[in-house]
Image (cartoon, grey):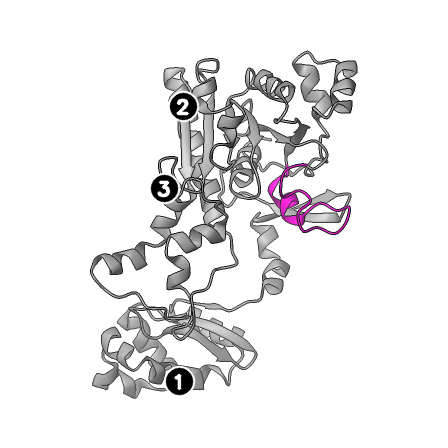
């Protein structure tokens, strides 16, 4: 097996829920030793959230393969002192606590930077430290609301809606990973660590480029459902056994589609001459397209669209997607095992490094590696037993 890119890098993971754990999951998959710090007995916030009694949350398992788990009570000075000892041997620390929490622990960057000049101190927050929203709780849905995503999403005659996907959280985790890799490269040249910070709100901004660019030109943003504000036809269409999304980006795509649905006559009709014209009669355009799609099987339509080069996709259920063997073949999901569930699927890297893959180890049981890791910093078994009895580990 090839040596993985981050072999020999040690990461202290104080991550919670999705964003920071997804970052450290990627670092672990690239070969870093990731030591996940969790609260004694209750664990990290996602570990037992909304899970069946006595079971670990499945999303937690997906995000925490290939890590080690150490329990430390950071509300106790002794727990914080143990964390500081661990940082003496660490290259990176990752945290996404709410604003002010690390300062309350005396673990803010300015509190420890002189003691650990080579440490990469990586933080993910909802908003920037200097934002007026800095102290707002920042779940993915909250940031969707703050960035305009919810207001811009939904059907024209309804209120705004959120997306159930945690796209901002995962984007934050990926950007934090990129920033950490850049900081490690910088340290290799300068010998000095860096503080890197990613804000969920800032990650949402590039995802809203199309919407913001329209608003910056003075255009009124209106919810369009599954339609695109500048492309027609572009919508979800019923089929005989489901639905497809068709996106005719170019006039060539429109001509190909018109011929496919036996309506080549529309090509010469001035009412259908370009996107601007078709958008004025979008309802009529959609009805014409759907009269053709609704009598045909979804997959047959997709095959025809592929052959014609028209951007499209089957509208699949979540159950269809997770049953698709391609997710495993491409490594988007990897198979592992966990006592609560037996066989489980965990997240793989969404990019290929041209190296042998790291076989996923099961996510650790709460505190499974506490003894092993504390032994490395000179804490013997008797001391660990005492600290455990006192709620420190």
| Left or right, residue 271 beside residue 52 | left
The kind of secondary structure element at disc 3 is loop
Q: Which residue is mark 3?
A: 132
Disc 3 packing (10 Å; few <14; some 14–19; many ≥20): few
- Residue 46 located within the stretch drawn in magenta: yes
Q: Relative to 378, say whether 54 is above or below.
A: below
Give the residue at x 31% y 59%. 211
Q: Mark 3 or mark 2: which comes first in sequence? A: 3
Q: Relative to 183, say whether 358 is above or below.
A: below
Comparing 333 with 208, the one in front is 208
Q: Which residues are magenta?
A: 43-65
Residue 236, how many percent across, how many down? 44, 73
Q: Which residue is mark 1?
A: 287
Q: Which residue is mark 2?
A: 194
Q: Are marks 3 and 1 in contact (CB under 8 Å)?
A: no
Give the residue at x 31% y 54%. 209
């Amino acid at each position: 097996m090839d040596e993985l890119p981050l072999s020999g890098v040690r990461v202290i993971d104080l991550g919670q829920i999705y964003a920071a754990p997804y970052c450290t999951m990627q670092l672990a998959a690239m070969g870093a030793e990731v030591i996940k710090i969790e609260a004694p007995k209750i664990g990290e916030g996602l570990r037992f959230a909304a899970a069946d009694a006595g079971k670990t949350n499945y999303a937690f398992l997906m995000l925490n393969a290939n890590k080690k788990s150490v329990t430390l009570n950071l509300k106790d000075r002794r727990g914080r002192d143990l964390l500081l000892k661990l940082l003496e041997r660490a290259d990176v620390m990752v945290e996404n606590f709410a604003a002010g929490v690390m300062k309350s622990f005396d673990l803010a960057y300015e509190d420890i930077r002189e003691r650990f000049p080579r440490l990469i101190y990586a933080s993910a927050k909802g908003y920037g430290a200097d934002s007026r929203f800095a102290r707002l709780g920042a779940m993915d849905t909250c940031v969707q609301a703050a960035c305009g995503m919810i207001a811009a999403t939904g059907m024209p005659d309804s209120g705004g809606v959120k997306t159930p996907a945690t796209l901002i959280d995962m984007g934050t985790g990926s950007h934090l990973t990129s920033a950490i890799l850049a900081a490690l490269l910088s340290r290799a040249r300068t010998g000095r660590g860096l503080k890197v910070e990613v804000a969920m709100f800032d990650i949402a901004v590039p995802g809203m480029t199309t919407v913001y660019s329209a608003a910056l030109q003075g255009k009124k943003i209106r919810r369009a459902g599954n339609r695109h504000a500048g492309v027609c036809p572009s919508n979800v269409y019923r089929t005989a056994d489901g639905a497809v999304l068709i996106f005719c980006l170019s006039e060539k795509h429109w001509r190909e589609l018109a011929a496919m649905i036996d309506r080549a006559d529309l090509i010469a009709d001035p009412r259908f001459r370009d996107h601007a014209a078709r958008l004025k009669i979008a309802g009529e355009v959609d009805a014409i397209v759907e009269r053709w799609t609704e009598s045909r099987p979804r997959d047959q339509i997709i095959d025809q669209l592929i052959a014609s080069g028209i951007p499209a996709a089957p509208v699949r259920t979540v159950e269809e997607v997770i049953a698709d063997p391609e997710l495993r073949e491409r490594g988007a999901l990897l198979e592992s095992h966990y006592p609560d569930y037996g066989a489980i699927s965990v997240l793989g890297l969404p990019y290929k490094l041209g190296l042998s893959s790291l076989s996923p180890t099961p996510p650790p049981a709460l505190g499974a590696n506490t003894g092993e890791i504390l032994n490395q910093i000179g804490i013997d078994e008797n001391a660990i037993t005492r600290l455990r009895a006192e709620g420190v580990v």
